[in-house]
Image (spheres, coloured by chain):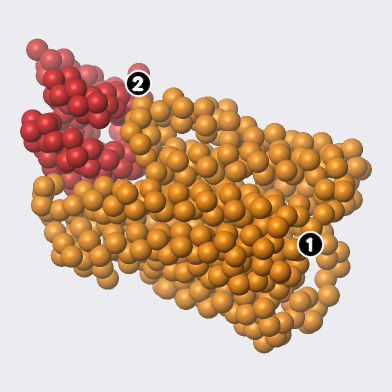
Amino acid sequence: MSQPAGLSFEQAPQFSLPLRFFLTAPLFLIAAAILIALSPDALASRWTPQVLALTHALTLGFLAMVMLGALMQMLPVVAGSPLPALHLVARISHVSLVLGTAALMTGFLTGKAAAYGSGVVLLGVCFAVFLVAAATSLARAVAGVTVNGIRFAVLGLTLTILLGVALALLRAGWWTPPAIESAINAHVSFGLVGWVLLLVVGVAYQVVPMFQLTPPYPPRLSRWLAGALFALLLLHAAAPVLPPVAARIVDALLAAGILLFVAATLHLQSRRRRKLPDVTLDYWRLGMASLIASVAVWIVAQAWPAWADSDAYPLLLGTLFIGGFAASVVNGMLYKIVPFLAWFHLQAQLQATAGSIPTMKDMIAERWMRGQFRLHLIACVLLLGVPFWPQLGIAAGGVLALSAVVLWINLLSAVRRFIAHGGDFY
Amino acid sequence: MNTILDFLGSDHHACDDLFASAEAAVAQKNWDSAREQFGRFQAAMAHHFTMEETLLFPAFESRTGMSTGPTQVMRMEHAQMRDLLQGMQDAVAAANQNSFLGLSETLNMLMQQHNLKEENMLYPMSDRVLGSERESLIRAMQASGSQDET
């Protein structure tokens, strides 16, 4: 179907297209959890091969995996602009993200240059294909606060990948870039704040009001926040060449901007019109609480160099941000997106009437989602102790693995119900 | 209100409010109130669909020559929503809370992403392409509302 730019109402891509991403993601979460459980001794520092491998299993294999799939699904709805050559882009980026993440993890764990090399090539292909397609789509998109947030997030992802490739080449021993420490810091802050947080911010503008019928975000906030945070990140990356006072101010503003987003989100959610129990809402609230804790831990490090230089600090910050904030929000979102898509495609394929097919709520049993949320919460609490008592990693990793397995089973149960009622997955 | 985006966009929000009230009454198993609130919500939705299908979409289609594109998808989603509303009506009549809340969760997702597409794309585009016809179209939609109420 061909439509003028900015007015594509082409219905959602087939069910299997985003689902291949969503069903693969929990497997990397399981892999990360196993690494945590198997090697508690390696959890004493962020630089051990195990921690580097499991961090990338979480950020690439779990977070980016879901986020890429979700963007392919969402851009037609929020931006009126699907990705060009969507099916080809989905196939290439999915396969290369899976293999590339596995190769990179192998590279970290074995130190073999060939593994790093193939990881870099595969991930390079994945993100080059995705980013070109996303940029094309975003260039034609209907302007709005969500599209604005996604644009900055995609820019953040681009910088993260470029820095990541440089760092991987360095690790493989092929190239020594200058200013390694600054490059690592920039890779981490563009990846976590530039890409992950700004994407959550942009998407929150739509989904927070939509899921619980809250008032909209204040336009004055939603219009400038993503751009301001991105500009502050650029300044933050340039901190080594800035006067110390300026760097302090940049950091303070960055923290304030993030807290402003959290405050607005929690405030809107407290004013929601739909007050029914909702596991996605609980995941969002856990995510927002973790984001506050991340900022607090980070602020303490700015004021207290001994803490900033400790091995525990970056591990605690990473756990709070990746596990407590990003993984929670993503997990909660999956529990809305997957049941809705299962219902939507089933209805559209069968032209079924409301009583004859399961509703969205029947797709994944409420009790199981609730149980998985509790496991995730326990895993998060245990993980917070790991930087101080690495032996706790055995229990934390075990619970996290169980949580990830239940997440996977829950997502599969939606697909199983879809197929059992006569849906055509491919 | 002199744009289609303002007029129909605020009607979306009015429908959302009625939806939330009906759903809250069902959640509390306050069935008398639930039936009344749901009735008002269903009537508001029916009116909104009618305004679009009999007034806005035909005007959009004749101005743009696109009769198989966006408006067709919107009509299809209206049909999906009507079907869910019918199911909700049956559930509220039978005082079946589980069935109602399953359908209302589904309707909310469908309705919100539908509204998003209209408010982000179809309404602004209609405002642009309809030009001078816009004022009279909004007046006609307003008039259709007062006829419904009498």
Crowding near pointer 2: few (<14 within 10 Å), some, many (20+)? few
Q: Which residue is mark 2?
A: B2
Q: Which residue is mark 1?
A: A183
Q: Colour of chain A?
A: orange
Q: Which mark is residue B13?
A: none
Label the red chain with its letter: B
Crowding near pointer 1: few (<14 within 10 Å), some, many (20+)? some
A277 and A105: which is toward the camera: A277
The secondary element bearing badge 1 is classed as helix
Position of residue A385 relative to residue A268, above or below, is: below
* Residue drawn at (64%, 60%) of the image: A392
* Residue drawn at (53%, 78%) of the image: A99
* Residue drawn at (85%, 53%) of the image: A309
Position of residue A134 relative to residue B110, above or below, is: below
Q: Is residue A289 visible?
A: yes
Location of the C terminus of chain A (image quadrant): bottom left
Q: Is residue B131 visible?
A: no
Position of residue A246 relative to residue A64, above or below, is: above
